[in-house]
Amino acid sequence: MEIEFGAYAVPVILTVILGIVYKFVTFGDKYKALISVLIGIGLGILAIPYKGIDWSVVSIVDHAIYGLMTGAAAVGLYELQRTVTKPRG
């Protein structure tokens, strides 16, 4: 099993996308995690034809779960970045 760089870069890329989306569109704080997870699931499912995998139930579920975990990781990274760069006071 080889390590794919894209598998580890996707949460960082999704964090950047979320930072841009949150800057231009205002959402309540309680919806940010939901939006991130939904975008992650969508990107995970869109990765199926990119990888050249057949559209089967197993691959759809695997990529949807990967997208869910990616969205959750992106929320954590975004909140960490926001707290670190937020001025104290």
Image (cartoon, grey):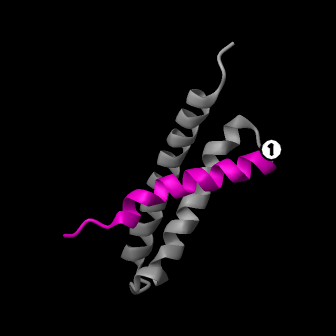
Q: Which is nearer the eye, 9 or 40?
A: 9
Q: Which is nearer the eye, 35 or 51?
A: 51
Instruction: Determine the residue positioned at 54% across, 62% down.
Output: 41
| Residue that numbered label 1 is attached to | 26
Q: Amino acid at mark 1?
A: Thr
Quadrant of the rendering where the C terminus is positioned: top right
Instruction: Determine the residue positioned at 75% across, 46% down.
Output: 23
- Whether residue 11 sits left or right of residue 2 in the image: it is right
Instruction: Determine the residue positioned at 44% across, 73% down.
Output: 60
Q: x and y percent of residue 62 in the render?
A: 39, 67
- Magenta-drawn segment: 1-24
Q: Is residue 35 visible?
A: no
Q: Which is nearer the eye, 63 or 76?
A: 76
Instruction: Determine the residue positioned at 56% across, 50% down.
Output: 15
Image position of 40 with respect to 44: above or below: above
Q: Residue 28 sits in which quadrant?
A: top right
Residue farthest along the top direction in this orientation: 89
In the image, is residue 75 part of the stretch drawn in magenta? no
Q: Which is nearer the eye, 5 or 73?
A: 5
- Whether residue 22 sits left or right of residue 50 in the image: it is right
Quadrant of the rendering where the N terminus is positioned: bottom left
Q: Main secondary structure of the magenta part?
A: helix
In the image, is residue 18 part of the stretch drawn in magenta? yes
Classed neighbour count for the residue bearing mark 1: other residues with Cα under 10 Å, few (<14), some (14–19), many (≥20): few
Q: x and y percent of residue 55 in the render?
A: 44, 84
Image position of 29 with respect to 6: above or below: above
